[in-house]
Every structure is written in C-alpha cells, then in structure tokens.
Image (spheres, coloured by chain):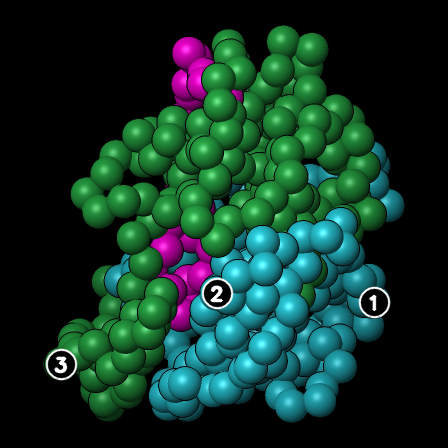
Chain colours: A cyan, B green
Amino acid sequence: MKHLFEKILSSRQIFKGRYLKIEQDEVQAPDGRTYVREYIKHPGAALMIPILPNGKVVMVHQYRHALKQVFLEFPAGKRDKGEDSLVTARRELMEETGYEAKDWKFLTTIHPVIGYSDEHIDLYLAKDLTHVEQKLDHGEFLEVTEVDPKDLMQLVQEGKVSDVKTQIAAFWLDKFLRGEWN
Amino acid sequence: MKHLFEKILSSRQIFKGRYLKIEQDEVQAPDGRTYVREYIKHPGAALMIPILPNGKVVMVHQYRHALKQVFLEFPAGKRDKGEDSLVTARRELMEETGYEAKDWKFLTTIHPVIGYSDEHIDLYLAKDLTHVEQKLDHGEFLEVTEVDPKDLMQLVQEGKVSDVKTQIAAFWLDKFLRGEWN
C-alpha cells in the first residue's frame, strides 16, 4: 500500500487554541501534485470497561458541549504527556468513578477521527474493582451509573449509545461475555 | 439529565482553515462558573456497507495523512451543505467505488468525536449493487477491495480495522448476518 502514501513537503502549526492545536502540512500525493492537509494534534486517550462483581459495568453520563447532549459513556480520558495509556486508564478510572481495579486487560487501539485528527484510544477491561474516592477535574461534571451489559447492547441497537468509543467497547464486551473472543 | 447541561454565554468562530473550522464558546457550567469550550464544526457524513451478491463487502484502502497510515475502510464521505445523508451515501458510493445500489437501509447514527467535534455519521446497508463508474474527487486516492465479512471480523479482533466508523459498521453487519438484529 506504499503507493498510496503522501510525501510531506512542509509542516507547521497553524492554530493553537485553549485546547485544540491544528497542524497544516503540504504534501505530494501519488499523482505528483501538491495538496494541503489539516489535522488536530492529540495526545491520545484511554478508555476502560470497569466490570463490577455483580456483572454490571460502571459508566458515566456526561454533557458534551460540541453536541449539546448528555452521552452515556465508558470512563475515559486524555493521556498526560509521555504517559503510558494504562497509567492514564488507572488515573481516569479513579478520578471519574472513584474505583480502583486490580485486574487490567488491554483490548485494542482505535482511531476515532482518521480524517482530521491523529487521536488514538487504547481500550482496557478493568476487573476486581474497589471503590475508593472520585476526584473530578476542574470543570468536569458527570454522573456515575451502573448498567447491565444486556441493556447496554439494547441501547446500542436503539441508537442510544452513539459515542463511538463507548459503542465499540460495548461490542467488544459482548464478544467477551459470549466467549467468542478472549 | 438537564442538570448536567451548560448554558452558552457567547459563541464565535476562532479559526477557519482550508478545511477545518473551530468554534469557541464561553459556557456557564453546573457549578455556576464560566468555562471555555472549543470544537470543530463539521457538516456530517454518511457511510455505506455495500454487500455484493457473492456475500462480500466492498471496502477501500485509503491513506490518511493525520495518521500517516493506510486504513481499510467502508466507503464514506462528507455531506454537501443541506444534503440528506442518503443522497450523500448514494453519491459517495458511486464516486469512491463505482457502484450504484437499489436497496438501502438506514442503520444508526454515530458521533465519532464528542469531545471536540459536532460530527455525526449516518450508517447505511447498501444492497442490490450494479457497477457503473468510479469518479474520485480531486486529491482523493484509494483502492477498492472486496472482503469476506468473516475475514473482516477477524481483522477487527486483531486490531487491523482501527477506524471507528468502519469497525462499528463491521459489528452491525455481524449482528445482521447472524440474524440477531434486523
């Protein structure tokens, strides 16, 4: 697939906001011509599927201003600079839900926005949970809830779990609980 | 969940690049304090799962400069202004793969970037295909391929289909082919 690659001719940051940073590259495409590509630079993130001893999963309701909606999500968060995503996962699980997990399993890495961001999200299963203490970030507001995995798949089918990272995690959980993947 | 909502105090476009547009809003959060939120304004998109009479699905390999990788994807594209996403789907299926489909079924709407973009993607199943003629956009380079749905799920499990819209479409297709969803 090397013949589809584009060669970078120049690269510069063209925007730096409070949170978002945009890179603009000039590239030479397979047809030999020059094109402009723009994309968000993102540090990467981690998501966890925290499974309680009762079989339910710990999730959060969170308002997302970009869409002016409250979403049902698995806990997740951005990596601090240079941080291993498992460290992010442990930190965010504690901060957002107040749980610590002893048993962690890496599932997969996903790319949510291949058209205009270099973001990747590492997905983990988190088991053997102990409740410690929730510590939300400044300006972060969310509600923790427990959901039965069967109900979660029903919500996915009904279009009520439209956040992609959460929907993908729900499908992976479904495969695990059926014993099809391990 | 109304108590999680944020009230918009002001809203302005703070960046307009060649492709990307960023909105910056000042909001009043549930704690009564003022915060800044930034997000990409996106027109929305459509994705299709084109199923051939032989049971294989039509997919594309496409280089994505934000990640400097070639991805295996279902055909998809951005809505033109005011366009119904089914019209987008028909247009993009033809442009990217050269196929026309007579039988269309809406599946679901997903939100790929709830943290920093208002993008949504409508997913469709496209059946009863006829090959007409591929018409790629200027600066668009991709390779059409046919994939067996079983092989696709294997690739998902192995982490080789990390594009979220494609992975979600693969899971929905899996549910349909097993007769669990309809």
For discs 2 and 3, the disc positioned in front in the rendered view? 2
- Tell me the magenta residue range: B99-121
As drawn, which residue projects farthest toward the front? A32
Give residue A50's position: percent from left, percent from top. Answer: 67, 62
Considering only order in the chain, which callout, 1 or 2, is on the residue closer to the N terminus? 2
Q: Secondary structure at mark 2?
A: strand
Query: From the viewer's perspective, is residue B102 above or below residue A9?
Result: above
Badge 3 amino acid: Ser
Neighbours of disc 1 within 10 Å: few (<14), some (14-19), many (20+): few
Q: Position of residue B75 (x, y in %)?
A: 53, 37
**Residue shown at the point (46%, 69%) measured from the top left:** A36
- Where residue B109 appears, x then y in whole percent? 40, 41
Crowd tier of the residue under label 2, counting other residues whose Cα lies within 10 Å: few below 14, some 14–19, many 20 or above: some
Seen at 53% across and 61% down, the residue is A33
> Where is residue A157 drawn, in percent x and y?
49, 33
Query: For this view, does A168 lie left or right of residue A159?
Result: right
Residue occupied by mark 2: A35
Which residue was labeled with disc 1? Answer: A103
Q: Quadrant of residue A28?
A: bottom right
Q: Chain of mark 1?
A: A
Q: For mark 3, name the chain.
A: B
Residue B53 magenta-highlighted: no
Residue B32 in view here? yes
Q: Which residue is mark 3?
A: B10
Q: Are marks 2 and 1 on the same chain?
A: yes
Q: CA distance from mark 2 to mark 3?
A: 35 Å
Give the numbered dot on residue B36.
none
The kind of secondary structure element at disc 1 is strand
Instruction: Determine the chain carrying the residue at label 2.
Output: A
Residue at (69% x, 11% y) in the render: B54
